[in-house]
Image (cartoon, grey):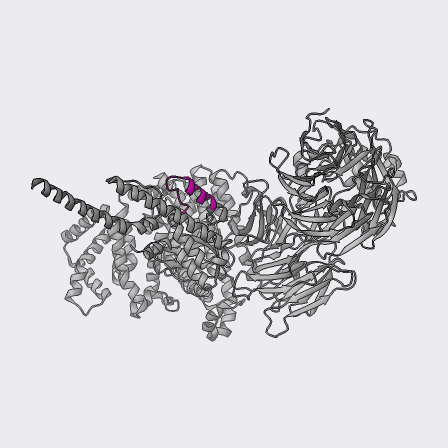
Amino acid sequence: MEPGDVEFIAEKELVKIVPNFALGKIYFISGDVGPFSPGLPVDVPLWLAIAIKQRQKCRVHPPEWLDVDKIETMKDDEIASEFFTELPNPHFCEVAQLLLTHATDNIPNADLLRTLIKDIWDIRAAKLRSNIDKFVKLQAGHARLDNLSQMEINTIRPFLTASLDHMYQLRISQSYTERNMSTQ
Amino acid sequence: MASKAPTIRYAHSEGLTQICYDASGKYLASCGYDGKIRIWKGIDDDEPSVIASGEMAYGLTLRGDTMYVASDNHSVDRFTFPTGEPDGILARFTGNVTYLDVSESRKYVAAGSSDFDIKIVNVESKKQKCYLGHQAPILCVAVDPMDEFLASTSCDGNLKIWEIESEQCIKTIAVLTPSNDIENSESQTRICWRPATGEDVAVPTSTGVSIFTRVTWAKLHSFTTDVTSKPFQCCAFSLCGRFIAAASADGWLVVWDAETQECLRKLQHPLKSSICSVMWNPLENNSLAFSDSRGQVGVLENVILSEQSTKTSAHNDLDALFEEDDDNMIADFVSQEAEEDNMEVDLTKLKKKSRVSNIFCSDDESDVDSKEALSRDLPAIPSTLEVLGNNDDLDLAPPTMPSTNPAKLLEDDDASSVATGAGAPRGTYASLISMQPAFQPGSTPVHLSHRFMVWNAVGIVRAYNDDTENAIDIEFHDAKTHHALHLTNHEQYTLADLSDKAAVLATESTADSTSKLKGVHFSSWDNNKDWTVSMPDGEEIKAVAIGENWLAACTSALHVRLFSLGGTQRQMFSISGPVVAMAAHTDQLLIVYHITQGFGSNQNLGFMLLEVGAGNGCRPRKVVGGQPLPISFGSTLTWLGFTAEGTPATVDSEGSIRLMNREFCYTWVEVASTKKMSKSRHDNHWVVGLHENPQQIRCIMCKGSLYPATLPRPTLAVQPYKMPLCEMDNDRGKLEEEYWRTKLLSSHGNYLTSRGYEPDPEGKQKSQVEVQQLLMRLFALCCKTDQEFRALEICSLMPTSAAVNLAIKYSSRIRKILLAQRLQEVAQEKLQEEHEAALKEQRKMQNVEESEEEEEDFRAEMQAGYSATETEWSNQRYRNAANGKSREKDVSDDDGSDCEAVVSQQMEEEVPKEKNTKPMRSLSSQLAGSRRNPFKKSIDAPTNSPTTTAASSSGSVLDGIKRSVPTSQRRTSSISTEATRKSKGKNNSKKQKTVQPTLFNKLNLTSTPKPKRAGSRTEPEEDESVLKEKNESAQPKTSRNMSGVQLFIEEKLSTIEEENPEMDGIDARKLAIQRFRSLSAEGKKEWNDRAKSKTPSSVEALSTGGKRKRDPDDVNENSPPEESNREEVNPAKSQKVECCETTVNSKLDTKSRLSAFAFTANE
């Protein structure tokens, strides 16, 4: 799965927008959206919100968690905690990223938020890497990681699985040669 | 006496200190000789934030988010609050600034300095005014709440009153012994105006607190106490103006009742140190903060012990008072008051703001006594709640315009007022203050630097008024209306209203210009969009409103001036009292004004609803004029407007939303209470708009405040309506509420129709269906609880006879035969009414139709525009109804039974109705821009088949009700009931017969409901020949046989079609039926048995079968073979008598679907 795919899935998350146009219900395969009336907040999928926003037809209401104070406490928690903390949204990074690129003018302190979210991402990525390092070094058979988001799993999966495979093969050949050596 | 000692803590180094509350009462700020300002989150805060401000800080004041500090660096500094960041220097002096004060309006900051100088800075314009005259360092300054006067004391021992505007000293009074510096002064004499009204000023003196009245500045009286002989340092009025606290140099804190002059609380500082500042908590009136010269701050809670009661003085001087008063009005007022008093009426509420007595207050002792006499029944201490209420009134009052100056009124009134002794201060008409000032609906208070001038359904007008800019932003919810506008606001416009065509702004008069009205006609096609009109001298615009193509401005001269959007002056008229608010919608104008002064804190409002006739040839009409406007007890009006559909609505400060009920004598009915919606008592829903369809209250949730801030941008929320009907906790109450609410909120349709607007047929039908559903549920509920009379009452509310028929069926099903019989009467009445109405309409239509027959088609398309005339579709409906009637006559002649007639009549009547809906709907759906849902799974999409809509909707009414009984049988039962009723008393056996079929039905349906249903379903699908055959062979060949036929057809159809590829579906089916007929009896039986055995498990199969069956019909609908004419919607052709039966049959089917139900609970 590509990061683009994960983002695509994340675009199904609902966000609140305040449209500046009037339109009846829109019927999509995944469900009905609307009706839109000017000035009245309505929940729409993220992809639609972005599409409308790009046409300058709405204001996006950032989700409650997309707020400097909340994100800052999240970051502090993330630093303090040994494990992964629970994210406010399973698609935290993607949603924040999309909103921060497309609806910058509707989010107060967008730049600060962007840095904070990047920080959180980095902290978590570092945690993930160190965990994997530990995992590999211990040659453990399985490990459990809670509260990982799809995007994070996705970033690490191809490399991790491939390298594990690789290591396995190396190990096998090693033991094979060792055995050969001993028999000889 | 002291119930609880004050909490005292160290704050500053020794020396003069000052303490101050912020508006929320949460924060305390103190300053002292250590040059620090400490901001405390309550007195228990151990870590107050500290701001350094010079070497010494002499005084500070908090207003909103700004803190002004007087320090020894010869300047008045500004800090943000509560963050405490420096925010610039407001004013500079040549000496230490010793005291400062900010006016209640936050417009002026006054500061006194040790260089004998007093300066007032206008915060907005930054202009300074100097007041030179004192001969010594200034001790204290205080700005009049009305922004007219300034009081100051100085070490030269004088109290001076200045006129702010003219910088003139108008009165000098010696109040204390002179000294050379503030530290050496025997008293700090920190003076205090009476809050809100400024009707008098309190000055601490060596013996107590002296009260000097406004205008004459004579000493009214003084509050004294015997506990101390030291001079008083400071004093403070409580925010409600009821209590006054003062503190002395030896630490005595004394609280008096400002009305009765009774000393309520005496308390000495534990260290007996001199208290130099005292302030009441603006939110909890029962606590006050003080600071002493040792640098300590303290808070005293429960200042007034609630069990204490004011003792009354003798009722002696009342008569004398009456003799003195020549003025009848005043005397009447007094006697009225006295009467009420004598009758032991609880005047608490009236006295809440304690203004009543002031109305006849004159200075001499007798009056004061009489005041006491009047208040003798009062519990002396208002509970905290009441005090809070007062605070709300004062502090968080709804958006106001600066009210008229009471002093002016005072002077005007003086001539005709009570004759009082020369030089004696006159009674102040402060009670006028309790009359709510005018406001613009949907605006936030004027004094805010960033505020909403209006927020309505069209858009938002915001005003920015700060250092960097002075501008107005107009923004539209719908980008289609217009792009956002940005105007500079040099003229200081404070009032605004906005429609989708224009905006209107208004300003009050200033020194060099009169009050102005500005129109921004942004939808105009010429280049000159703006216009300005000046009001005549002395006329202030108090309220503006903008309608469809006109606007109105109401002025202080009680004129309502109408203008066109282009700025042409139109009519003007007068109203009978000062305006409170005004709202407009299309050509309706709603004005709310004061009728008279209300008692206590109540408002006595009246309203006027006009149609100004500015619209498309509409004529002006007074709808309601001069009626009192009901608002909640003790509340003020906070919003006035129309629902999106044009029904007048109000919101008051108690949170009650009321709508005018046009259907019920133009009365007002409460439809929601925002107080009940909010979780916290301090939250408020700031209503910006109401919608009736869909039922929405659009409002902004304000946490802990009465109105929203402009930033962060507030979000609209939607709240439901809820009428306060009784017993809302049970099902019946809920249903009744829902019924009346739906009734009320759908009544706008009738009004709009009467105003020449084309009603929205879809919406109307929807609400009708809703009403019917609700009634049906109520009916079922009553039947369940055996309240038959109530059930009957509910049935008589039902809109159509068809609905009543459903009820009849239902009641006979649950064996309430008596009820069913009664209902039959109701049904007949309804039927008659419907017919009369239909006939009337038809006659009307025919007249129109004859002349305009050819244009009909165009007209149908022009439905988009507003036209008062009916369109072709509705015409046909009535025509059909008439035809149906003539046919029905034939039928009744043939059969000779009138009950049959009733039934057929009913059936026929509904055919055209339903046919009608289709084109109507599609039209309206085009208009509304709504589209069909292509993904909707259900086959009977409502837009396509109105019949199924009706069926399914009635199905959902009776949620738990199975649709199972074939109509024919059920019909017979109802018919026979009717028949029995007719021949009642004649024949008992007949009556039994009536019961039997019903029972029989019941048995039947419980045993084998499914095949019957299949039978009834197939009926319309079958060819005419089959129908005929069926009619010939009559009922004995039951529907079970039919399902055998169907099964046969189903199975054989494909083979037949293969055999005869040239045949179309219908012919093939004919052939199949023929083959079935040609089968032997055994063969038929076999098929029937198969059908029977198949049914229990084949509900789905059947329904899919039905679906498959329908396809050929659908094809027919579109292609024009002859059959389609018979079955389908062609009203003209259906007039053929031969088709009649077909229609009846298809009708039967619809009816059966509509009515086939059973209440599961009872089965």
Report whether residue B1038 is seen: no
From the viewer's perspective, is B72 left or right of B452? Answer: right
Q: Residue B390: where, in percent of width, then height? A: 69, 40
**What span is colored magenta in the figure?**
A72-89
Q: Residue furthest right?
A: B422
Report whether residue B679 is seen: yes
Q: Tell whether position B1073 is magenta.
A: no
> Quadrant location of the N terminus of chain B?
top right
> Quadrant location of the C terminus of chain B?
top left
Q: Residue A75: where, in percent of width, then height? A: 44, 45
Q: Residue B713: where, in percent of width, then height? A: 55, 54
From the viewer's perspective, is B330 left or right of B998? Answer: right
Q: Residue furthest left?
A: A184
Say which of B46 and A56 sits in front. B46
Total marks drawn? Answer: 0
Does residue B988 sit above or below B923 in this rendering?
above
Q: Tell whether position A77 is magenta.
A: yes
Residue at the (63%, 54%) spot, across then down: B451
Residue at the (48%, 40%) spot, across then down: B732
Q: Residue B1061: where, in percent of width, then height? A: 17, 68
